[in-house]
Amino acid sequence: MALYIKGGRVIDPANGINKIADVKIEKGIIAGIDDYSGAITEADEVMEAAGKLVVPGLIDIHCHLREPGLEAKETIATGTRAAARGGFTALCAMPNTKPVCDSQTGVEFVINRAKAAGLVRVYPVGAITKGSEGQELAEMADMAACGAVAFSDDGKPVPRSDIMRLGLQYAQMVGKVIISHCEDPELAKDGVMHEGYWSTVLGLRGIPAASEAIMVARDILLAESVGAKLHIAHVSTARSVELIRQAQWRGVNVTGEVCPHHLALTDADVEGFNTATKVNPPLRTDQDREALRSALNDGTLTILATDHAPHTAEEKACEYNYAPFGISGLETAWPLFWRELVESGVMTLPSFVAAMTVAPAKRLGLPGGTLSTGVAADVTIIDPEYTETVTLENWQSKGKNTPFVGQTLRSWPVATIVGGRVVMRDRQVIG
Amino acid sequence: MAWQHKDLLGLRGLAKQEIELILDTAAPMKDIIGRDIKKVPTLRGKSIVCLFYEASTRTRTSFELAGKFMSADTVNIAAASSSVVKGESLIDTGKTLDAMGTDIIVIRHAASGAPHLLAKHVKARVVNAGDGAHEHPTQGLLDLYTIKERKGRLEGLTVTILGDVLHSRVARSNIWGLRTMGAEVRLCGPSTLLPPELAITGVKVFTRIEEALEGADVVNVLRLQLERQKKGLFPTIREYARQFGLNQERLKRCKSDVLVLHPGPMNRGVEIADDVADADFAAIEEQVTNGVAVRMAILYLMMGGSGSGAVH
């Protein structure tokens, strides 16, 4: 018995495939992409996909699942349900939990919890420094050996240049990428939104664009000097883009990612003090947004990630200054990226799909991201014509902190398949 | 014309006619303050709560007296002695006051946008009495009223706002109000306390006081919060006073009938010289009186009074 995804537009950038075809899945494995109309028997399961896109399962290399320690915000079980609903088949969980995932125990906990939840794949990211305190290296080799796929102190920067340099060297030794949260802590201190016209008008403390760019520059120079692999998380400013572009010209092994909210919103959206717009790095200006688009268009930035950061409603129902940073993003990522990048013509469909599948997989050395014959059958089916208004009614994440409620978006994931098992169908999570 | 909004959260976005309505209504209110018996029944049976999360003498007292002069029942809550210290959220505090039948909540808060949050969650009308570095609309209105009272107009005047604009909610409300009313606004202060982005609003930005004062009709001197110096935003208070302090010599660059304002409390000898603060061309005490009148006008209008209605 096989599962056939029939008649969809199959886009597999890793293999240069972009055609109407059937995808055959057998025993959880991709068995082939072809015209199977004559081969389907009554015993087989068929998913009709005419008019839909059939792409490798989406991979998010930047999300926060909050477990252990912050289960009121999210658990691995609820976070993976949100992922399934958003079309993601694999996630990289950032280590800023309580305690911080900075040891073998922490990595194993995440892996085991994800197995128990059993919905989508979860890859732990280990901390660079103990407790993400920025003072001493965490046991990165140990963590890598038991399943950490990359290292990051995300949520905060590594303030000391000497420690960051050591982290890059050590990560290089174990063949992993450092994911850097770029922010000069002194420049950004007490800031709650982008520093500019709107922070001035609203009287909110600003975070200058330079606070990100300065650290991007530092980390690029450090990575360059030691020959390490560097990935810049949630790039938000034009200057950061420029620095990454120049570094790539020089041959530095640096990549960067863009989040949906930095494309869909600007600092002007903070007007009205809606705490759902409070995110770090903050929503920037139109010019920054345009720079991100250009960088995605010309291939400087190749990865799309959510920075899914769920918080409780109580935490966000307060004065703007006191609210935590973060947007719950897994469930709206695809249609937002679609609107900002595909409908607006910034990216071609194959390069867009690549940015959510094969590019993140390759960068961190993850399995998946392709529909090659013989690989685990992680597949996402998208209906590009389907429109839905964002409501919290069927929201799977515990974090309801989204500024997109009420927006009607086009193009939604309608099925998510992990290892041949359907975990989301018709927008409903199964299991 | 009647007040159209549920709340008064800022001067940004208010129309010229709306500002005029408040200023016109404040004039008869000021007459009441001048009477021997300062009491009219206008707001009898109405309840006003002053919810102050920051220390304040003049604004809180001004609102309280404004309510009392119109026979409203006024209650003061200082956050330090309220359930806030038990961890109660602003929304819950607001809902509690709502449930008690409060008609107007006057809120002062250190966080920009706090009145907006409150207004979204309560049925009571909300008046912003100063939120963070965002707005202080009633201070802005009393400044406008004072200028208009002295100068007879607002349109076409040149008003220089001097000092720590970056952290000043007074400056922001003044900018919006004055620009809407057709005045030219200049900002002046050390570059570390002067956001250049405000130039987008149509104001002129100066770091040399002599240029900023040239031909000005009004100088509004902001209070310098002395802890800014400890945070390194400017080198010393001495240098600040020498570079940006308003004194008689510097005032000579202004029009001969210049009007000087200050929202108080003043650091005499720092941002303003003693003999400037006490001169006839300064209206600092008048501002305090006008503050009560303007707040009476706002409370009155928000409770359904019309600009042309009787306030006796």
Image (tube, helix red, strand yellow):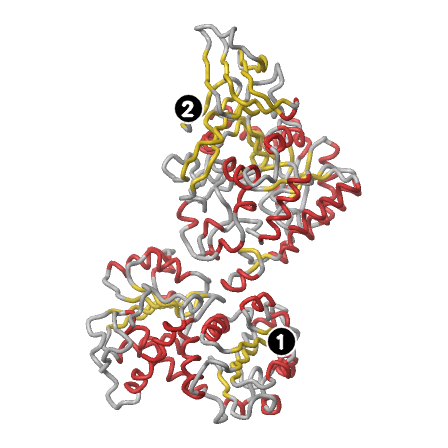
Classify mark 2: residues with Cα within 10 Å, few (<14), some (14-19) or many (20+).
Answer: some
Chain of the residue displaying label 2: A
Residue at image location 53% in from the left, 45% down from the top: A264
Say whether residue A143 is visible: no
Q: Is residue B147 left or right of residue A233?
A: left
Q: What's the mark number on residue B206?
A: 1
Q: List x then y, in percent, for residue A174.
A: 72, 31
Q: Dot 1, crowdedness within 10 Å: few (<14), some or many (≥20)?
A: many
The x, y position of residue A57, in whole percent, is 55, 26
Q: Nearer the viewer, residue A117 or B124?
A: B124
User: Which quadrant of the view contains residue A33?
Assistant: top right
Quarter of the figure with the C terminus of chain A = top left
- Amino acid type shown at disc 1: Phe
Please tell me whether mark 2 or mark 1 is closer to you in this view: 1
Identify the amino acid type marked 2. Answer: Ile
Q: Where residue A430 is drawn, which disc sits there? A: 2
